[in-house]
Image (cartoon, rainbow, N blue to C red):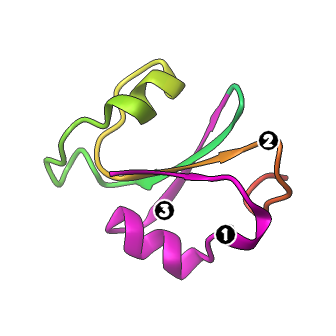
């Protein structure tokens, strides 16, 4: 699963992000924004996420939320 946040009103809370990724949230910075992923995804044997991996330039597993630098988000400081 992959979700892209395109509007500030859809910016997820910590609880919403945890529910989507299925665990503790890890923030990974990428060129155009951030990815929110399950920090223990590899230990849980989650499947590769091709869209998130392409943004990161490496292997990302499990559900991911992408938040672009173009929107005002509490996740991007």
The answer for how far apart the CA atoms under marks 2 and 3 are is 18 Å
For discs 2 and 1, the disc positioned in front in the rendered view: 1
Image coordinates for residue 63, horizontal then vertical, percent: 34, 53
Residue drawn 66% across the image and 69% down it: 10
Up the image or down, 7 lies above or below 33; here it is: below
Q: Which residues are magenta?
A: 1-30
Q: Is residue 35 magenta?
A: no
For discs 3 and 1, the disc positioned in front in the rendered view: 1
The reply to whether dot 2 and dot 3 touch (C-beta < 8 Å) is: no
Image coordinates for residue 41, horizontal then vertical, percent: 28, 51
Element under disc 3: strand
Which residue is labeled 1 in the image? 10
- In the current view of this chain or complex, which residue is farthest to the left? 45
Query: Does residue 23 appear left or right of residue 47 in this picture?
Result: right
Image coordinates for residue 70, horizontal then vertical, percent: 83, 42
The reply to whether dot 3 and dot 1 touch (C-beta < 8 Å) is: no
- Residue 69 numbered tag: 2
Up the image or down, 6 lies above or below 23; here it is: above
Pointer 2 or 3: first along the chain: 3
The answer for how far apart the CA atoms under marks 3 and 1 are is 17 Å
């Amino acid at each position: 699963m992959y979700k892209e946040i395109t509007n500030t009103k859809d910016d997820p809370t910590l609880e919403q992000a945890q529910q989507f990724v299925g665990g503790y949230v890890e923030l990974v910075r990428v060129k155009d924004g951030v990815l929110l992923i399950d920090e223990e995804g590899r230990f849980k044997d989650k499947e590769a996420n091709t869209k998130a991996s392409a943004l990161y330039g490496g292997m990302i597993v499990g559900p991911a939320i992408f938040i672009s630098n173009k929107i005002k988000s509490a996740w991007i400081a």
